[in-house]
Image (spheres, rainbow, N blue to C red):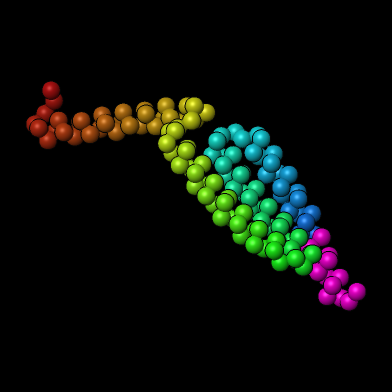
Amino acid sequence: MNLAEQIEALATGFALVVLSLALLVTVWRIIRGPTLPDRVLALDMLVAIAIGLIAVVAIRTGFNLYIDIAIALGLVGFLATVAFARFILARGLAPETGGAEAGAAKGRRAAGARTNAGQRKRKGGRR
């Protein structure tokens, strides 16, 4: 085994360890949440890590079909992320963000009051 093969084996082994740890942390984030967008983002990250793992395995084994599998997984992962994003948009704000939603409603009411006051001034005074 020459020096180049040793470096390649060391680098792919290190990459497999780091990607495996990243996979575990990402799965923890999917389980923990706390919100649905966090979970969707973690799922997208999980797909990216899986593509990296498949690429490292392809380099390590020399079997080039794994690269095609990684490309297909990337396409499917992208479509899944877009579908989840559309689902979140169609569903509206989650009940988990109730505090933010109430704050946004209060801000809209305050902005509406300022607009009404400006209209009264233009019409010539208070009513």
What x and y, as percent, mark residue 31?
Answer: 66, 35
The quarter in which the N terminus is drawn is bottom right
Q: Quadrant of residue 5?
A: bottom right
Q: Is residue 92 above or below residue 10?
A: above
What x and y, as percent, mark residue 14?
Answer: 80, 59
User: Going by the picture, which residue comes out furthest to the top?
Assistant: 127
Closer-to-camera residue (107/71): 71
Q: Residue at x 63, y 50 (%)?
A: 47
Closer-to-camera residue (15/61): 61
Left or right of residue 126, residue 93 in this image = right
Q: Is residue 104 above or below residue 40?
A: above
Residue 5 lies in the magenta-colored region: yes
Q: Is residue 111 above or below residue 76?
A: above
Q: Is residue 122 above or below residue 52?
A: above
Which segment did they paint magenta? 1-13
What x and y, as percent, mark residue 113?
Answer: 26, 29
What x and y, as percent, mark residue 84?
Answer: 51, 41
